[in-house]
Image: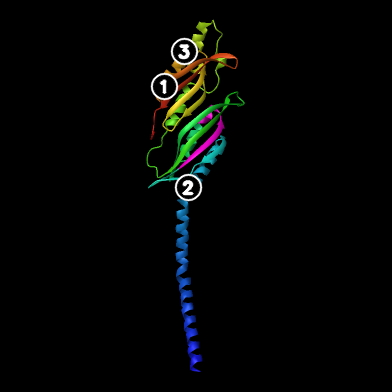
């Protein structure tokens, strides 16, 4: 009888211990679980993965809103530093010349908060397609970096360079500006930097070095283009590498290659 009573008492004590643990878990686990969930949610918001996705969504929304023909994106692996991280991102577009400033501005307008998107290199080439107004579509690739914890001013070097470029030359062929040989006085009056040269490829590297390939209806306009680009204050070290007589759409032209440098304009 004593053994039965002792065993019964042990079971009661065991059940009391379990009940106490259950009540404690109900009383105290609730608040801690809610706090942990909030901490997890906040942590996830600040992760490189979540921030990169957010930045990408903001860019795509901007391009769609601005009717810019986005083509593709390539995202490189994350680069982690001591106090920040970087995500190299390459985006490609098919656009017209007047959409280039709008596209570059999209990277600035999509920046802010905990990340900044800065274009580091650009390549623009004339495609075989034309818009309804006859202007050529351009294939534009922008290599940018999504960076966290950026405290310096936004670098607008590329934006200023393309603004100056558009006032000096163009990506549209200027063959209709040419005047038949022999009418030298009329040629002198009509041929200028703005209507006598055009660029077919422009490459800007991450160190701001630039390479231009294009055509001119007269040889004298090539060096004149270099001078006019330097006068804008956005370019320096313009150097003519080569100039060759060529034919463009059955018209005699001069093909040229020019290198130079875009003047840095951070924080402006």
Residue 238: assigned label? 1
Position of residue 130 relative to residue 86, above or below, is: above
Label 3 element class: helix
Farthest top residue? 182
Q: Marks 2 and 3, Cα distance to the nearest angstrom?
A: 51 Å
Specify whether residue 89 is painted magenta. Answer: yes
> Foreground: 46 or 121?
121
Residue carrying label 2 = 51
Residue carrying label 3 = 220
Crowd class of label 2 (few under 14; some 14 to 19; many from 20; radius 10 Å): some
Crowd class of label 3 (few under 14; some 14 to 19; many from 20; radius 10 Å): some
State the predominant SS element of the stretch in magenta.
Answer: strand
Label 2 element class: helix
Magenta region:
87-100
- Mark 1 touching mark 2, by CB under 8 A? no
Crowd class of label 1 (few under 14; some 14 to 19; many from 20; radius 10 Å): many
Q: Marks 1 and 2, Cα distance to the nearest angstrom?
A: 40 Å
> Foreground: 55 or 82?
82
Quadrant showing the C terminus: top left
**Residue 55 locus on image (x, y percent):** 49, 44
**Residue 245 locus on image (x, y percent):** 52, 14
Q: Residue at x 47, y 63 (%)?
A: 34
Position of residue 83 relative to residue 128, above or below, is: below
Position of residue 98 relative to residue 110, above or below, is: above
**Which is in the foreground here, disc 1 or disc 2?**
1
Location of residue 72 (image quadrant)? top right
Q: Residue at x 50, y 34 (%)?
A: 142
Farthest bottom residue? 1
Q: Earlier in the sequence, mark 2 or mark 3?
A: 2
**Which is in the foreground here, disc 2 or disc 3?**
3
Left or right: 82, with 16 as reference point: left
């Amino acid at each position: 009888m004593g053994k039965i009573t002792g065993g019964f008492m042990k079971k009661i004590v065991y059940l009391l211990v379990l009940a106490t643990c259950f009540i404690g878990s109900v009383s105290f686990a609730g608040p801690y679980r809610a706090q942990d969930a909030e901490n997890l949610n906040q942590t996830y918001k600040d992760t490189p993965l979540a921030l990169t996705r957010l930045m990408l969504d903001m860019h795509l929304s901007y391009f769609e809103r601005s009717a810019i023909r986005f083509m593709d994106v390539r995202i490189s692996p994350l680069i982690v530093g001591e106090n920040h991280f970087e995500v190299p991102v390459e985006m490609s577009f098919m656009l017209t010349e007047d959409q280039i400033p709008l596209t570059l501005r999209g990277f600035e307008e999509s920046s802010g908060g905990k990340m900044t998107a800065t274009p580091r290199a650009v390549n623009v080439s004339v495609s075989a397609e034309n818009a309804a107004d006859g202007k050529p579509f351009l294939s534009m690739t922008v290599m940018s970096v999504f960076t966290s914890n950026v405290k310096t001013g936004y670098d607008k070097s590329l934006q200023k360079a393309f603004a100056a470029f558009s006032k000096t030359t163009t990506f549209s062929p200027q063959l209709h500006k040419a005047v038949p040989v022999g009418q030298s006085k009329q040629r002198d009056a009509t041929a200028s930097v703005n209507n006598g040269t055009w660029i077919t490829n422009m490459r800007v590297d991450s160190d701001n070095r630039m390479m231009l390939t294009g055509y001119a209806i007269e040889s004298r306009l090539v060096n004149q283009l270099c001078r006019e680009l330097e006068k804008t204050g956005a370019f320096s070290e313009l150097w003519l590498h080569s100039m060759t007589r060529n034919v463009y759409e059955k018209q005699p032209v001069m093909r040229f290659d020019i290198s130079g440098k875009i003047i840095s304009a951070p924080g402006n």
